[in-house]
Structures are given as C-alpha cells and as structure tokens.
Amino acid sequence: MENNELIVPMTLIEEKIYMLRGQKVMIDRDLAQLYGVSTMVLNQAVKRNIERFPKDFMFKLSLIEAKNLISQFVISSSYGGIRKNPSVFTELGVAMLSSVLRSPRAIAVNIQIMRTFSRLREMLAENDDLRRKVEAIEKQYDENFKIVFDAIRNMIADDAAGKSEIGFRVE
C-alpha cells in the first residue's frame, strides 16, 4: 500500500471521535469496525494486554453514558443492543492498540487515526488563535467606542448644564 492511499476516509474517522468526560475518545465497536475485526476480538486483545491500558488510555462508560451514547449517536440495536458498557479509548489508548493489533490493516488504519487526531489538534489550535485575535479586535473597538460614547455623554451634559429651563415649573 502506498503512503497516500487511504484505507478509510478521514471524514469517517473524524465522525467516530467523540468528546466524553472532556476527552476526545473512540468507542471500541467503532475501532473494531475500522480495523476490520469484531468488537470481541478487539476487547480480547486489550484484556490480554490490560497492563498497556491505564485509565488515561481506556475506560468503561457508565450506564448513563452508554444510554446517552445510544440515544445521541444512534448505535444500532440490530444485534439486540449493547450487552456491556462500551470501552472507549483516548488518543493514547488508540496509539497503544497498534501494539496489540498487528494486522497490516490495523497498522494502516491506526496511522490514519493518529494523523486525524493530530489534524484535529491543529484545527483547535488555529481556532484558539483566531478566537484570541477576535477578542483583541473587540477589545480595541470597545475602547474606541467608549471614547466616542464618553464624548457624546460630555456633549449632552454640557448642553444640559448650559441651558436654563424655559416655561413654568409646576410644583
């Protein structure tokens, strides 16, 4: 396989990266599908090498998280739904999967996934830079508008102070 040839479209990988517990993660069944193995095979390989997957690499979803996942991401119930709470893998966990799943497809897909995570990180950094620039511009304009509004207030105050009232005062 050539370096430029993609086994899985990058957009498909991006669609399978979710934010859970404040981390970008991928679900075991999605990873298994991308690697071309069953979820059971993926989870067995992880169990045989569990020392490679500390909590910041992989964790099980709670029952509530699993139910939310089913409703939000429309996980198919064609196989009777999920029987166990899914495991999810952080970027580090996905990288570690390459050491336990060694098929040529798993290696190639893993490289694509790592590149996708990297690209998402770059996009977030670019968005953060853009956000900072917009905030700086807003601050600059806020200061300029403050000067204008202060000048208008002073003109109104000067006009009100310099004029005497005309007419009758009712008390």
Image (cartoon, helix red, strand yellow):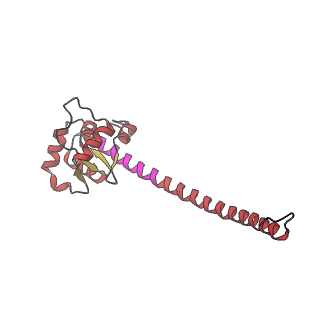
Does 95 appear above or below 16? below
> Which of these two is toward me, 95 or 1?
95
Horizontal and vertical percent for residue 85? 20, 44
Task: Count the numbered circles shown.
Answer: 0
> Quick one: quadrant of the C terminus?
bottom right
> Which of these two is toward me, 151 or 119?
151
Q: Considering the whole magenta stretch, tell me its main secondary structure.
A: helix
170 relative to 40 in the view: left or right: right
* Residue 137 in which image quadrant: bottom right
Does 80 appear above or below 114? above
Q: Which segment is the magenta one? A: 107-124
> Quick one: quadrant of the N terminus?
top left
Horizontal and vertical percent for residue 153? 74, 65
Q: Residue lying farthest left?
A: 48
> Which of these two is toward me, 117 or 155?
155
Residue 121 falls within the magenta-colored stretch: yes
Does 167 appear above or below 88? below
* Residue 52 in which image quadrant: bottom left
Q: Which residue is depicted at the point 39% across and 50% down? A: 118
Does 106 appear above or below 131? above
Horizontal and vertical percent for residue 67? 26, 42
Q: Which residue is depicted at the point 20% across and 37% down? A: 82
* Residue 75 in which image quadrant: top left
110 relative to 14 in the view: left or right: left
Q: Residue lying farthest front?
A: 171
Q: Which residue is depicted at the point 29% across and 43% down? A: 68
Q: Which residue is depicted at the point 81% across and 70% down? A: 161
Horizontal and vertical percent for residue 30? 27, 39
Residue 41 falls within the magenta-colored stretch: no
